[in-house]
Image (spheres, grey):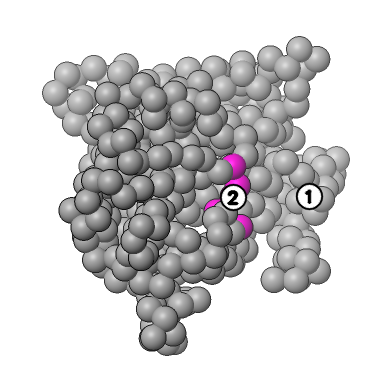
């Protein structure tokens, strides 16, 4: 999309937002319009919380990824291999701190070893945003008992700090790819949300439409960049948040607790109204039709075809633990920690800093405590809609 078209779309959203916020004072509306029309950090997703926090609090993601590991193993057995003795390149798109990447990478390496033997080099590239905690990633690779580096002397690891909405690795270099719990994150929030921080539960149809446009554009960009990087015959397995066939994005009690706590923090003077109005979680649960749309006309998008597509509901391990223990406090704390590690850093970019830079951290502590209290009061099983698929790049003879 041309820059002027993107700006025009943002301005349209800004005007819609102003119309939907009658009753707010004009200074707030002007501030929100400025935030939506000027490029700023508030439009960009932030990396997951560092210092091991994401590793400790992402077992919902780990459980949800397990069904897709079977697809990755199948892809590793079927993928076209580079000529020997060239190394085999695996790309891990959206690695965060690496804990949840270890089982799928180990499974892929085991499957490839059956085909290439134990001497041939297999190179794993972990990728994430430039500000990701790559120190924690390398510590995980070095120290975790289940690290794929421990028992395979011909496996090598590297990391690249770059968005997967850009080309990350050289053209035609990647044999096998993996992306889990990543592509629901948009490249940017196209506008503010007048009545929520998660667009799936906004009542503003115009805002939902603009987010859907951004999600469609980003999905096509992701596919185009991966097509450049994959070798002919290469495969990429994707596992991501989705909207199920009943139109449910899921996590409703969690989102309600999050937004309810934020509005309560405004009432208590812990954050300002204009700060809340800037807060957006730039994630989007695509529907089956939205995932498949780029492939609809010819069966391909940027030389990629899609197979093994499935929408399903992931396991809520936090609920399972609550059923076994009856510990409502632990239930609330675990879901709040899940949100803290994944979405709080992005929300915190909308909080104005104090001279000592401690306010964003206090904001996250207060938000976590409030969510824990709300979720502990009424534990409920979460709906976790997910999509998994394998993308295949056409062989040179078929392109």
Residue found 80% across the figure and 15% down from its top: 355
The N terminus lies in quadrant = bottom right
* Circle 1 residue: 39
Q: Which mark is residue 163?
A: 2
Residue found 21% across the figure and 58% down from its top: 115
Callout 2 secondary element? loop
Give how far apart the Cα atoms at labels 1 and 2 are. Answer: 17 Å
Q: Is residue 54 above or below residue 20?
A: above
Q: Residue 66: horizontal and vertical position, in percent?
A: 24, 45
Instruction: Between label 1 and label 2, give the one nearer the viewer.
Output: 2
Left or right side of 78 for 214: right
Query: Dot 2, how many residues are within 10 Å of its Cα: few (below 14), some (14-19), or many (20+)?
Result: some
| Closer-to-camera residue (76/280) | 76
Q: Is residue 369 above or below residue 203?
A: above
Residue bounds of the magenta highlight: 161-166
| Closer-to-camera residue (102/337) | 102
Q: Residue 81: horizontal and vertical position, in percent?
A: 32, 64
Residue found 43% across the figure and 67% down from its top: 231
């Amino acid at each position: 999309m041309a820059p002027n078209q993107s700006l025009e779309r943002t301005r349209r959203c800004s005007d819609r937002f102003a119309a939907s916020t009658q009753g707010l004072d004009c200074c707030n509306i002007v501030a929100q319009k400025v935030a939506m029309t000027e490029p700023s950090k508030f439009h960009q997703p932030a990396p997951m919380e560092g210092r091991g926090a994401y590793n400790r609090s992402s077992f919902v993601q780990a459980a949800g990824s397990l069904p897709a590991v079977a697809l990755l193993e199948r892809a590793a057995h079927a993928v076209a291999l580079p000529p020997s003795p060239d190394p085999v390149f695996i790309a891990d798109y959206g690695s965060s701190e690496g804990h949840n990447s270890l089982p799928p990478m180990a499974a892929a390496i085991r499957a490839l070893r059956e085909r290439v033997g134990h001497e041939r080099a297999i190179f794993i590239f972990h990728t994430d945003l430039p500000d990701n905690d790559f120190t924690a990633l390398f510590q995980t690779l070095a120290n975790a008992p289940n690290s794929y580096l421990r028992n395979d002397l011909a496996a090598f690891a590297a990391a690249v700090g770059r968005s997967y909405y850009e080309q990350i690795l050289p053209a035609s270099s990647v044999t096998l790819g993996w992306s889990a719990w990543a592509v629901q994150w948009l490249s940017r929030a196209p506008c503010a949300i007048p009545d929520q921080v998660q667009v799936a539960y906004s009542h503003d149809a115009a805002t939902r439409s603009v987010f859907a446009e951004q999600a469609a554009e980003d999905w096509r960009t992701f596919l185009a960049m991966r097509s450049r990087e994959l070798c002919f015959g290469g495969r990429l397995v994707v596992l991501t948040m989705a909207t199920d066939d009943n139109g449910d994005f899921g996590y409703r009690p969690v989102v309600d607790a999050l937004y309810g706590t934020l509005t309560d923090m405004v009432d208590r003077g812990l954050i300002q109204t204009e700060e809340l109005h800037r807060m957006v979680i730039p994630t989007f649960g695509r529907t089956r039709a939205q995932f498949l749309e780029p492939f609809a006309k010819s069966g391909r998008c940027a030389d990629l075809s899609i197979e093994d597509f499935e929408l399903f509901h992931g396991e809520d391990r936090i609920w399972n633990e609550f059923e076994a223990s009856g510990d409502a406090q632990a239930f609330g704390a675990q879901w709040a920690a899940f949100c803290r590690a994944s979405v709080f850093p992005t929300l915190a970019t909308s909080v104005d800093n104090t001279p000592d830079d401690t306010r964003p951290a206090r904001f996250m502590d207060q938000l976590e405590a409030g969510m824990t209290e709300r979720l502990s009061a009424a534990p409920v099983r979460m709906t976790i809609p997910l999509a998994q698929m394998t993308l295949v790049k056409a062989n040179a003879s078929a392109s």
